[in-house]
Image (cartoon, rainbow, N blue to C red):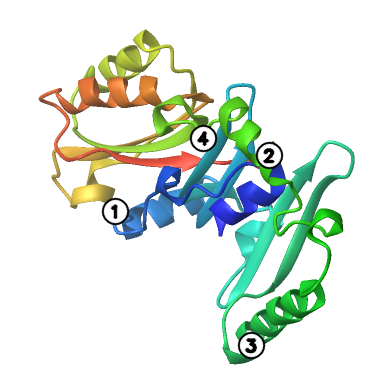
């Protein structure tokens, strides 16, 4: 869906192989709880965005502020948020699953095909609303960015030993990578591992940063002897 919308929105060829896709298997109940405490909900989003360097095309779980309409889309309902230079932000909401919504979409496609049958190709609207020669040019001028070049903000959950200096070391490594911190939440050790626990969770929210820089910083943090488990990283979308 994200790939098709990127083609329609930006006039680029359909490029399924260039979409970054990450599922929900790495999410834990703790992340859902911490996100809610921070005023966010976790949603699986498909995001495509035009930037000065090219097109972002990615699908992954994201922290979204609870007050955003898209954060409250549940069950079989789907929503698409579109941001345009003149119209601003608009939202399209409706059923995305079920026999009747699916049948309606299929029939709509068949009606479009029937209407175009026999039409003069030179004077008909192309399927993606862009002529083929402009799509070819767009593929060169607007490449799909590799994930390492995407700029966004992050939620990090880091299980650490409950001892002095751990937070300072981690924040120092983030600062060294040029990553600015928005907020830090440290859980009490007994909340994480029970009474007498010697480990705790650090929750860090960052400002926007390049994904490649974040990857490098996380590799360094993961190598610390005081980091006791694989780091959980979830991208954060404010959708302002």
Q: Vertical placement of 5 versus 150: above or below? A: below
Q: Going from the N terminus, do you reach mark 3 or mark 4 first?
A: 3
Image position of 52 (left or right of 180):
right
Residue pictured at 60% horizontal, 30% vertical: 142
Q: Going from the N terminus, do you reach mark 1 or mark 3 first?
A: 1
Q: Quadrant of the N terminus?
A: bottom right
Q: Quadrant of the C terminus?
A: top right
Q: CA distance from mark 2 to mark 1?
A: 41 Å
Q: CA distance from mark 1 to mark 3?
A: 33 Å
SS of the residue at dot 1?
Answer: loop
Q: Going from the N terminus, do you reach mark 3 or mark 2 first?
A: 3
Judged by depth in the image, the label closer to the viewer, 2 or 1, is 2
Q: Count up the numbered dots.
A: 4
Residue pictured at 62% horizontal, 69% vertical: 78
Q: CA distance from mark 3 to mark 4?
A: 32 Å
Q: Quadrant of residue 237?
A: top right
| Marking on residue 26 | 1
Q: Going from the N terminus, do you reach mark 2 or mark 4 first?
A: 2
| Marking on residue 144 | 4
Question: Pointer 3: what residue?
Answer: 103
């Amino acid at each position: 869906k994200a790939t098709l919308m990127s083609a329609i929105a930006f006039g680029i060829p359909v490029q399924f192989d260039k979409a970054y896709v990450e599922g929900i298997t790495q999410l834990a109940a703790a992340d859902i709880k911490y996100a809610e405490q921070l005023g966010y909900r976790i949603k699986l989003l498909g995001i495509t965005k035009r930037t000065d360097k090219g097109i972002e095309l990615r699908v992954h779980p994201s922290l979204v502020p609870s007050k955003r309409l898209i954060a409250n889309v549940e069950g079989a309902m789907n929503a698409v948020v579109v941001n345009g230079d003149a119209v601003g932000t608009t939202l399209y909401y409706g059923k995305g699953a079920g026999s009747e919504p699916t049948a309606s979409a299929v029939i709509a496609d068949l009606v479009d095909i029937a209407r175009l049958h026999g039409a003069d190709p030179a004077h008909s609207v192309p399927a993606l609303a862009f002529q083929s020669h402009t799509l070819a040019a767009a593929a060169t001028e607007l490449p799909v960015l590799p994930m390492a070049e995407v700029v966004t903000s992050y939620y990090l959950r880091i299980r650490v030993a409950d001892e002095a200096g751990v937070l300072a070391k981690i924040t120092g490594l983030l600062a060294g990578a040029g990553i600015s911190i928005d907020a830090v939440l440290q859980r009490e050790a007994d909340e994480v591992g029970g009474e007498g626990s010697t480990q705790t969770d650090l929750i860090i929210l960052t400002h926007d940063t390049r994904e490649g820089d974040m990857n490098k910083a996380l590799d360094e943090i993961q190598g610390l002897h005081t980091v006791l488990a694989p780091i959980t990283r979830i991208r954060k979308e404010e959708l302002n």
